[in-house]
Amino acid sequence: MIGAAYGLYGHIRNNRIRSGFLIAGLFLLAYVMTFGIILIGYGMSGAPLGRHLVGEAGRVFLTALPFVTAATALWVFIGFRFNVALIGRMTGAQTITPADDPKLYRMLENLCISRGMPTPKLAILESEALNAFASGVNEKQFTVTVTRGLLNQLDDKEVEAVLAHELTHIRNGDVRLMIIAVVISGVVSLVGELVFRAFLRGGIRSSSNSDRKGGGTIVVVLIGVALVVVSWILAIVVRLSLSRSREYLADAGAVELTKDPDAMISALLKISGRADIDGVPSGVMDMCFENDPDDFADLFSTHPSITKRVQALVELAGGRMPDMPPHPPAMPQRQDLPSMVQASRSWGAPR
């Protein structure tokens, strides 16, 4: 089975470990960024470089440490407690009841019963894009959101495959891990952006004036800026470094649930190039069923390419490529579907 090939249980165990390390990493990045901000403040004040400055900055940091810890813990709490509401506010997704869409809810409920897991909430995002994502960190919060475009363009079997994919993300702990990653990148990026805006407005001029007084304050400012930049970059790396194997495993879990690899392949091909949701933050797009690569293509994408995901389903799950592509590609950087069909013949897929 494809899931066994990718180490399902090892992936779930590693997600739990990574979650703890990511939370600890958030506190560490908050401390590093705080010390950088303190150094920038001292440098802009015109204090001369020396042991006295370093010692004073250290004392201020120790004084601020409990407040920084409390603020970071509060942010983690807010992220865990209100992540579904925050994502709903950012995307405009609306939670629905079984009465609003009985067929969709019944489809999700049947999948959950077959897996022996509680049925998450359902939400619909009014967008012509074809995409879906899961959110939440516990059984009370878990929500599967699908776009209106996905429901309009995919048939029932394909929608079921997408729902099964998102349920597997919940079961494997991927959703909790992604929420933590978004919490980390969000708070550090926000603080970093505020610092640089303040610095660019008056910091360079102030630093130059104080440098003439103290003779070394520009060095202090540069060190502080470097610490803030490092924290900022590491926050982004946290998001990009999450293993892409989670998507292969979620595809595998969907096939295990639906027993229909062809439906997953067809869904992937229809969604290809049509997944971008206008106005949705990049952190939320990282959580989606598909996140179309940008100009850097596959190198910095949080998802494997559609071609690779389809290839895995053909090679390891017995899936078959359709004879005709479901739709023409919508993005120029995507491989065109006819060539994907031709490529499948070289994979040795059963016809």
Image (cartoon, rainbow, N blue to C red):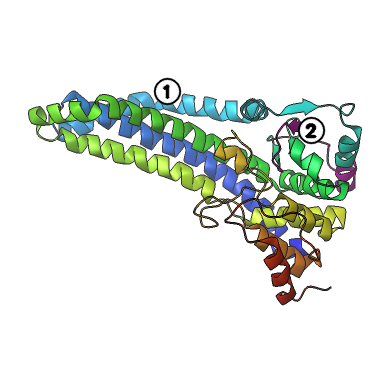
Q: CA distance from mark 2 to mark 1?
A: 38 Å
Which one is in front, 273 or 69?
273
Q: Which residue is mark 2?
A: 122
Above or below: residue 215 compared with residue 273? above
Determine the residue positioned at 19% across, 27% down.
205
Question: In which quadrant of the rendered view does residue 103 lie?
Answer: top right
**In screen coordinates, is 18 left or right of 252?**
left
Is residue 36 visible in this depiction of the protein? yes
Disc 1 marks which amino acid?
Phe
**In screen coordinates, is 24 left or right of 246?**
left
Q: Quadrant of the N terminus?
A: bottom right
Label 2, secondary structure: give it: strand
Mark 2–mark 1 contact, CB under 8 Å? no
Determine the residue positioned at 76% across, 30% down.
140
Residue 133: % across, % down = 70, 40
Q: Which residue is mark 1?
A: 67
Of labels 2 and 1, the one closer to you: 2
Q: Quadrant of the C terminus?
A: bottom right
Residue 60: % across, % down = 29, 25
Residue 82 is inside the magenta segment: no
Q: Indicate which disc, 2 or 1, sits on the residue closer to the N terminus.
A: 1
Disc 2 marks which amino acid?
Leu
Q: How many marks overall?
A: 2
Question: In which quadrant of the rendered view does residue 312 lie?
Answer: bottom right
Label 1, secondary structure: give it: helix
**In screen coordinates, is 302 left or right of 211?**
right
Which one is in front, 340 or 146?
340
Tag shown at residue 160: none
Determine the residue positioned at 63% across, 58% down.
305
| Magenta-highlighted residues | 110-130
